[in-house]
Image (spheres, grey):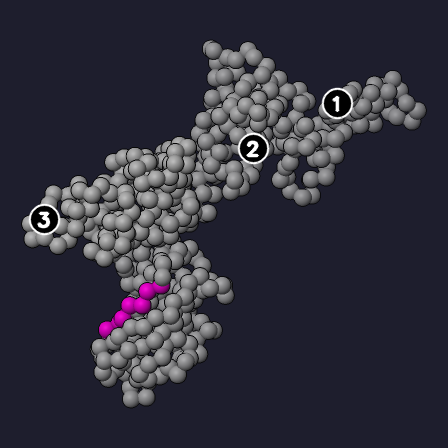
Amino acid sequence: MAAELFSTSIPQSDDEEVLEGKKSFIQLSGPDPSADRCNQHHLGQPGDDDDDREERCSWQAAHPTLRERNALMFNNEHMADVHFIVGPRGETQTVPAHKYVLAVGSSVFGAMFYGDLAEEQSEIHIPDVEPAAFLTLLKYMYSDEVELEEDNVLTTLYAAKKYIVPAVAKACVSFLETSLEAKNACVLLSQSRLFEEAELTQRCWEVIDAQAELALRSEGFCEIDRPTLEIILQRETLHVLELVVFQAVVNWAAAECRRQNLPVSPQNQRSVLGKALYLVRIPSMSLQEFANGPAQSELLTMSETHNIFLWFTATNKPHMDFPVAKRSGLLPQRCHRFQSSAYRSNQWRYRGRCDSIQFAVDRRIFIAGLGLYGSSGAKAEYSVKIELKRQGTTLAQKLTKFLSDGSSSTFPVWFEHPVQVEQDTFYTVSAVLDGLELSYFGQEGMTEVQCGKVTFQFQCSSDSTNGTGVQGGQIPELIFYC
């Protein structure tokens, strides 16, 4: 019923007025009580003058703007001249609408209702659109409001494309871009290619390239169609071990078998993969990775397994059906925030204290690790805990070791996975080192650094207890992908 489905995001001060107006002028079953009251007033009630009668009978007068009046008509039987039966059979929902409003909002509806081949039917079936998505689309046409949620944004995008409503499609794409992360990047890539949304496709590739392991291990990867699987496997810039690619392909094949109601077996997995299997760069793995992974998967034929072992070990290598070159991956970039470095006999000491700095960027990037200074005297090994936080919440941390060679060079320390960093928000990176007390430290620090297409801003962190700040100290570099 319309009363159950009606919702609006008219400002709070108008909400009660809108709802009361809706209740006062329309009832979905039985005679219209307001009409009876109007008739009674028209016949004349003691104490009522003509102005009072007109005001009581006019719901339009209670809502002075066109936007308010149109919003009241959304999903409303009052004056509806067309009904849509929306959704697949068995899950349909009837949606009342007004041809004029829809024709003004969509060229497709304009042609449907007022074109040379205009629909004469009072009911129109739309089995390929979800009811929630159709209501979201219609609400925009009646009120200029777009209300999106994670579970309806893709179906709404489909509806907006089908009925050529660019503003709703743009809102859907913006919503998807802000919610994009490794776990849904492959699914969104599939959808963005289907809908021919170039900007969203590019954003998906940025995430998949930089966070390939997380993307390929996600449940969403197993949900993509085979053409999207093939285009991902052809990607040169995937930053991931090829063994992870192979394992992801095996998982996708198992999911595809289940979708096709086939038993999950190596033979069926190979069958559903087709030529996609030959896009995995198996010969680029190490011998140990191959022996512990693909060689024991039963996905390869005995001949293929034999030839790949010869590829690893023989002088005269056999012809390969699989690509043999490693993926180029992504080239890490480094933002260096100091103009010089130095050391003194009594600095830079650690003793379990924290070196920390805050930074912000003007575009989305992926932080992969930190560059740190090492010993100022001789070769030395350091234990280090690095951490990335946003507003006090830890996004990534890693406890590891690195070896310095006594030079003023920086030494990279990597997070487990690159971390997506949004623009115009300050993040905190920290390092707690344990090792040789005397090390290099940075000087002449900069508050702003241009690094390729990215501008970094730095400010001091309250987490820093070892003297590191904007002007000097540790954490000379941020290592990132863009």
Numbered disc 3: secondary structure? loop
**Mark 1, other Cα within 10 Å: few <14 / some 14–19 / many ≥20:** few
Image quadrant for the C terminus?
A: bottom left
Numbered disc 1: secondary structure? loop
Tell me the amino acid under the disc marked 3: Lys
Q: Is residue 18 left or right of residue 358?
A: right
Residue 46 against residue 422 in the figure, above or below: above
Q: How many marks?
A: 3
Q: Closest to the observer: 336 or 212?
A: 212
**Mark 2, other Cα within 10 Å: few <14 / some 14–19 / many ≥20:** some
In the picture, the disc for residue 132 is: 2
- Measuring from the top left, give residue 39's x and y in whole percent: 83, 18
Tell me the amino acid under the disc marked 2: Ala
Q: Which residue is mark 3?
A: 317
Q: Residue at x 30, y 42 (%)?
A: 232
Residue lying farthest to the left in this orientation: 316
